[in-house]
Image (tube, rainbow, N blue to C red):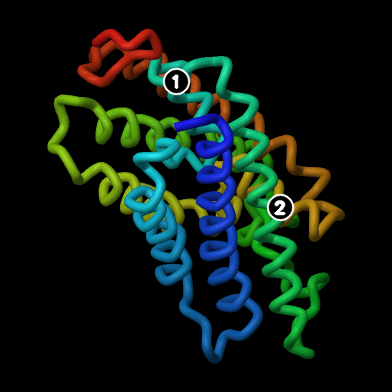
Amino acid sequence: MTAIQKSLAEFLGTFWLVFGGCGSAVIAAAFPDVGIGLLGVSLAFGLTVVTMAYAIGHISGCHLNPAVTIGLWAGGRFPANEIPAYIIAQVVGAVAAAAVLYLIVTGNPDYDIAVNGLAANGVGEKSPGGYAMGAGIAIEILLTFFFLIIILGATDGRAPAGFAPLAIGLGLTLIHLISIPVTNTSVNPARSTGPALIEGGIALSQLWIFWIAPIIGAILAGITYKFFGSNAPDIDGTKG
């Protein structure tokens, strides 16, 4: 696959993740009578990853997340020279999805972005459960770490073939069930960037948290997984 094909796949996949996941959260929060609740939003995020993993996994690897791209590099699974193109495509896809989502939800006269938001991440007064910054940073590092461990393990050549998308999607669902009350769940800097740029305010001022914490967790996971060895191709085409 060419770099353009991979970038387009990452753009479309990240668009789908943000539009599907954040879209379910915005509608559920803004309109409780037709909402799907915590379980539904968590499942929606997981389903976006499962569906896109089968759709574009064979094209770009279906990262959809700068932390995943960097974590795979740290684990010896991804070449450094492709990281910028992937991250740019992911962020642009997330911003485009947030913009389209905002256009749609404002079609309802009861929607107010100042009140309902756009499913942006946050801590302190921006946290759904009022959790402090330290708690938010800790859970984002921890859950991104385990998300990357799941990804690295499920895509290892020694793992059962064909089940990686399900394991990864269910892992993301569990992550959301745990951490939506704390930070509204990021573990993905691109997912955080799209809604924050549209919302502005506190969401934008806290965006740095949702870049730094997930990337730290991802790098730690990549380094840790190397301890187990790997039967998946490394960046030089050999086996680890």
Is residue 115 positioned above or below 201 on the image?
below
Image disc number at residue 95? 2
Residue 227 lies, in percent from the top left, at: 29, 11
Going by the image, does 61 lie left or right of 80? left
Mark 1: which amino acid? Answer: Phe
Mark 2: which amino acid? Answer: Val
For the point 58% across and 16% down, the residue is 81
Residue 28 lies, in percent from the top left, at: 56, 77
Residue 3 lies, in percent from the top left, at: 55, 30
Q: Residue furthest right?
A: 201
Q: Earlier in the sequence, mark 1 or mark 2?
A: 1
For the point 51% across and 31% down, the residue is 2
Is residue 197 positioned above or below 159 on the image?
below
Image disc number at residue 78? 1
**Residue 143, can we see it?**
no
Residue 127 lies, in percent from the top left, at: 66, 55
For the point 35% across and 54% down, the residue is 50
Image disc number at residue 199? none
